[in-house]
Amino acid sequence: MTGLRAHGGRIDLAASLYPEAPVPWLDLSTGINPRAWASDPMPAVDLTVLPSPASIAALESAAAAVFGIDADRVVALPGSEIGLRMLSCLDLPHPLRVVVPSYATHGDVFAAAIPIVRAVIDAVDAGTLLLANPNNPDGLLDPPARLLAIARRGAWVIVDEAFVDLLPSYSVVPHLETSDRVIVFRSFGKTFGLPGVRLGFMIGPPLQIAMLRARLGAWPISAHATAYGTAAYRDTTWLNATRAAIVDRAARLDAVLARHGLDAIGDCPSFRLIETDDAPALFERMARAGILTRAFDHDPRWLRFGVPGDDMAFERLDRALGRD
């Protein structure tokens, strides 16, 4: 169970722990969009050459247009987690604070960081503050103005916007000025349903962008990430339709949970959190039905459900929740 609490998506581990569960497994443990982006044909990828600087620049330009900022403020990464783990090379000021609860990675980013709850972040006026918006696992959201106010009082603010593509009005990025002490991370895989591509981005002030580019080197991402990312970010029709559809599916998940006496927490349409004394037993029941949800060491009363992708997935979840 320890591995299943550390990260979502461990169907391999779940299958070994629950060998009698029906297959295929339904993975609701990650919040990754189960309706992945696709095109016909899919982008051509030439693996016999390195991605050119021009092709990587085109990717960053396509992503920047979606994010709402100039392309020279955006640097492509082999996954946003890599960027978070490289923050130490940017010489950010102390004290270092991390909002909890949130991603396990955040606690690993800074050595001896001071944990701080979200309710009191407005008092921060110096050092560095790392948080997620929307937060994980509770889906809490802050308006950009709150985060910008902290930065403009003197603190550096690092915002993990892994899920904000589906809630663009909550992104701080379009509101940034060049002088703002704000660094933002964005994830490709969660929104576009292609986490195996391993693609993310950092948005920040020019100096920090230059420092990270120097650390990453000439070829920071793969040919697949370059080609798929460029095509996907240019497909704004798909992205706009996905934003609308996932909000509808999140409302449907709320209704399914409520029908079984479970109240959903959070405003992130990619997942819902429930809090109940029965969470451990409910996790077991779901797992024995071949449905992987996400439990947490932080609070054993928490259980997170990713939004199902289609009618069959909703019906399977509904049936499993109805069993005693």
Image (spheres, rainbow, N blue to C red):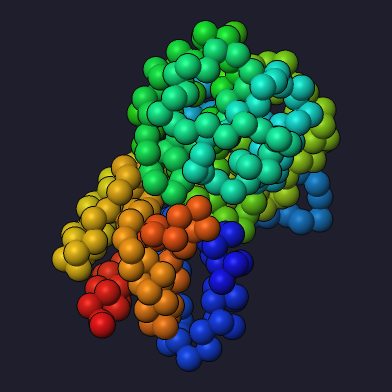
**Where in the figure is residue 215, as x and y percent of width and height?**
82, 32
- Viewer-nearest residue: 310 or 172: 172
Residue 44 location, quadrant: bottom right
Residue 240 x, y percent position in the rendering: 34, 41
In the rendered image, the vertical position of residue 90 relative to residue 244, given as above or below: above
Q: Residue at x 81, y 50 (%)?
A: 49
Residue 259 in which image quadrant: bottom left
The reply to whether residue 106 is visible in this rendering is: yes
Comparing 82 with 72, the one in front is 82
Q: Is residue 99 above or below residue 73?
A: below
* Residue 185, image x, y percentages: 58, 34
Left or right of residue 87: residue 22 = left
Q: Quadrant of the C terminus?
A: bottom left
Write the residue at 37% across / 66% down.
279
Residue at 63% over, 46% down: 105
Residue 181 in view, yes or no: no
Image check: 44 left or right of 20?
right
